[in-house]
Image (cartoon, helix red, strand yellow):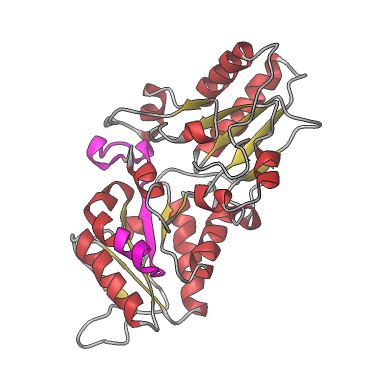
């Protein structure tokens, strides 16, 4: 088991071997971002054939340079920093989206799981900020399989930039997670028999919390019908048919989301949410999660609260919107 940033490094290097147009780089965080290309070397005056750029601590300049490379053509640029430092590059990332440039923004240390670096390095609002930018894919995979799928999506969308958000902490293999599922944006990784009464949906490392929350709930009531959903990309999910969306978040099922970031926006899909709407704190990643009660027990408790609230009444899916309705 490795962090998704480590899985990203493996996939990126495999891609670089097969796609000579790919160039990579980092804003002075190469060892942390895992973006070094083993098949090449630094791009320098003396080595212009190098495919790795050391941008230094200049996130906006890095993203702007990548826009220039994408505009010129013949190159697929990828650049990296910590997710929270997207803020320094947002103007250029927005220009990538506006200009339909395929730039891969590899953003690691994607949550309060960063740990000891504390709130300056722990993104809270960042994922949602990126999700509000038109023509920008935001992908947060839960394990190695989804990481491979995220890169497939980013490379196949030739006119859309992507923010790929990867964890610092270990992300065990999720049974049911797949590369193919990423292309749908959201999909069921752990299904019940029959129609679900409850859907637990997560992104990234929080998908595992949803899986564990299901186990807790079934120990208390084995008759509960629960689906677990991984939702690595909202934008791809919104591109699916209404029929597919309702198969993931069906009528009759209470939906609870879990993401170690702001809960703002999740009301589009979930009836209740587990997340964080304050700045983080310094401490070991696992301890920080416990401090802010982003745990499998918290997900299970929220599920019980909302199941009780909707007991005896019909539950309408949040995605059951009228045809033609504008979000």
| Residue 159 position by quadrant | bottom left
The span picked out in magenta is: 94-122
Residue 5 is situated, as x and y percent measured from the top left of the image, at: 43, 54
- Above or below for 92 versus 282: below
> Which residue ends up furthest to the right in the rendered image?
194
- Can residue 175 be seen here? The reply is no
Residue at image coords 51%, 47%: 234
> Position of 2 compared to 286: left or right?
right
Front residue (pair 44, 299): 299
* Magenta-span inclusion, residue 320: no
Front residue (pair 257, 238): 238
Residue 320 is situated, as x and y percent measured from the top left of the image, at: 63, 35
Residue at image coords 50%, 67%: 157
> Position of 213 compared to 120: left or right?
right
Residue 71 is situated, as x and y percent measured from the top left of the image, at: 33, 77
Residue at image coords 35%, 68%: 99
């Amino acid at each position: 088991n490795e962090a998704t940033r480590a899985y990203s490094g493996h996939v990126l290097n495999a891609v670089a071997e097969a796609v000579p147009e790919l160039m990579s780089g980092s804003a002075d965080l190469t060892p942390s971002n895992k973006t070094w290309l083993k098949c090449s070397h630094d791009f320098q005056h003396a080595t212009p054939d190098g495919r790795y750029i050391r941008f230094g601590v200049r996130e906006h300049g890095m993203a702007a340079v990548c826009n220039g490379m994408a505009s010129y053509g013949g190159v697929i640029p990828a650049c990296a920093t910590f997710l929270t430092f997207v803020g320094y590059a947002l103007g250029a990332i927005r220009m990538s989206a506006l200009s339909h440039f395929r730039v891969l923004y590899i953003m690691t240390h994607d949550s309060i799981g960063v740990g000891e670096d504390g709130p300056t390095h722990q993104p809270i609002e960042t994922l949602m900020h990126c999700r509000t930018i038109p023509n920008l894919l935001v992908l947060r995979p839960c394990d190695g399989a989804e990481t491979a799928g995220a890169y497939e999506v980013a490379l196949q969308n030739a006119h859309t930039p992507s923010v790929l958000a990867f964890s610092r902490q270990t992300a065990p293999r999720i049974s049911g997670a797949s590369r193919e599922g990423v292309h749908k944006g959201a999909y069921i990784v752990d299904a019940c028999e029959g129609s679900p009464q409850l859907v637990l949906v997560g992104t990234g490392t929080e998908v595992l919390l949803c899986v564990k929350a299901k186990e807790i709930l079934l120990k208390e009531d084995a008759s509960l019908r629960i689906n677990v959903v991984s939702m690595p990309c909202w934008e791809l999910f919104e591109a699916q048919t209404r029929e597919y969306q309702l198969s993931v978040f069906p009528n009759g099922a209470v939906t609870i989301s879990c993401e170690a970031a702001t809960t703002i926006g999740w009301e589009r899909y979930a009836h209740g949410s587990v997340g964080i709407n304050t700045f983080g704190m310094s401490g070991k990643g696992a301890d920080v999660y416990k401090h802010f009660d982003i745990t499998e027990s918290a997900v299970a408790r929220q599920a019980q609260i909302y199941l009780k609230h909707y007991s005896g009444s019909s539950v309408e899916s949040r995605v059951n919107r009228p045809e033609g309705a504008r979000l």
